[in-house]
Image (cartoon, rainbow, N blue to C red):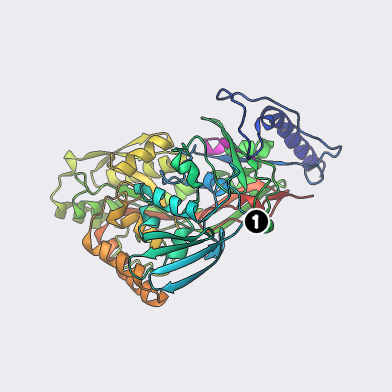
Amino acid sequence: MQKKMQGKMRKLAALALAGMAILGIFAACAKEPEPQQEGTAESRPMEEENSGTASVQKRDTLTVATESEPPTLHPFDQKAVTTGYMTALVYNRLTRIDPETLEPQLDLAAAYETVSETEWVFTLRQGVKFHDGSELDAQDVKASMEYAQTFPTTRDYTAFCKDVQVVDDYTVKFVTDGPYAMTLEDLASLCVLPSEQIEADNDFNENPVGTGPYCFVEWVRGDRLEFEKNENYFNQDRQPSMQHIVWRVIPEGSSRTIALQAGEADFIMEVEAADINRLAEDETIQVQKNDGTRLNFLAMNSEVAPFDNKLFRKAVSAAVDREAVVTVACDGEAAAAVGHTSPAFGGSSDGNAVKHDLEKAKEYLAQSGINPDGVSFTCLVSNDTARRTAEVIQANLAEIGVKMNIESMDYATYLNAIMSGNYTTAIAGYTSSNMYSFVSGLYHSSSLNAANLARIQDPMADFLIDTAKTQLDPAERNQTFVKLSEYLNDWTAFAPLYQTTVVKAYDKDLQGVIVGKNGTVPFDLVSWAE
């Protein structure tokens, strides 16, 4: 017990020192901040109480460690998981996805009704204020959808909308191009922005403005992002407890672990696999594990030789030892996967999937007509886990005479390369809250230059995805997804690798922590134990 108390005291001391350096920069939510040069901050001391334990000391700051810096804070011009963490703080949508059930719930919408197969009418909550002080109305929703539709990265959740009509100040109608089963799910991705800021051509990367539980304060590139509680947040059932949330960018996994154990961070979003047991044994730390929705894979650009050859793609996929990848890259904390759709969703199938079989890989390679002696390509990676994964695959491919090089990039450069098609292979992954969003984002031709990393433009894949979106009966829709899954497995867009286990680690004195299957954490519900 004495050792535990000493450890906690060390954590508090470290936190207090960090707090003196960073807490002073926060400004009131609806006020214009005083001009500052990037990287500077006026400091103020943290308020302290006499007790030395976190459970009784008043703490109003949460420090979250994340491995990758967001490439942008723009809510639409991106497909980055890390940006999604930030937009969840700043913005609301008409609906939200429950992190545990993955079912849609109302958010900015107070009610909705379907007046026909193609018309959805939403009634907005009244009195909701944006961070700039303006009040939410139907025009903001209309402007946000129309603005979002100008970005290719939003097509998977905005393409359903044929028209948006303002009925009155607090009523908005969405018109779909035919029956569409996923309207509520797609609207859970549409951040609602103030129309005045859109019209004024506000830079939402530098100045994010939403209605969310936290307001953006400062982004010190390469170091941290800071947010302050929205004192005017509309949702009385979800009033945030933390006054401040600081996101620290710590690329190396072991450094994130050290930061948590030293009290320099309170929460780790990406836990280093090799450190999970170490953290679980620490009495001051809680480790939470959940089955996840994220499918990880070796992305192969089908527009670039030799991956424009289906049999060569099959050869590569058959050569990959997925169990070795899980052991080496994830320390066993994942499930090997061979199918192209996430088994977390109904309609997933491993039919026609290419499994690890070295002799079969050599057979596919011979059938492809490609001489491995003349093949050499590069695999892009953006973090330690991806590099370990690539190293296993590199050794696997060497067994069939194929040479693969590995190139590490910072996250923003990596994302730009793979989403624009300026790559050959990469270690990547994709997560969503439902099967339709998953397959439309990864495999529909409308998602080129976004999440369609394989650059698929296949009429049958598009047809099956488009068919599923019109099927209101879940059982019928799942049958279509099974057909799609088996078609994609044969198409071999990727070499599927593993299904992620969602692991988060945090200070045991944090309460209200909910870890979603898709890796999200609603931080507005998190608080320090009294």
Q: Does the magenta stretch include residue 92?
A: no
Q: Is residue 8 visible?
A: yes
User: Is 520 rendered above or below residue 479?
Assistant: above
In the displayed orientation, state which residue is furthest to the left.
Answer: 369
Residue 357, by quadrant, is bottom left
The magenta segment:
245-254
Q: Name the foreground residue: 64 vs 375.
A: 64
Residue type pointed to by label 1? Asn
Q: Does the magenta stretch include residue 252?
A: yes
Left or right position of 112 against 348 = right
Look at the numbered disc 1 and give the secondary structure of its residue.
Answer: loop
User: How many numbered tags mark residues here?
Assistant: 1
Q: Quadrant of the N terminus?
A: top right
In the displayed orientation, state which residue is furthest to the front.
Answer: 168
State the image coordinates of residue 288 (x, y, percent, origin top left).
61, 54
Q: Name the foreground residue: 237 vs 146.
A: 146
User: Is 135 rendered above or below residue 70?
Assistant: below
User: Is 374 rendered above or below residue 321?
Assistant: above
Residue matched to label 1 = 235
Left or right position of 512 against 216 = right
Residue 427, by quadrant, is top left
In the displayed orientation, state which residue is furthest to the right.
Answer: 50
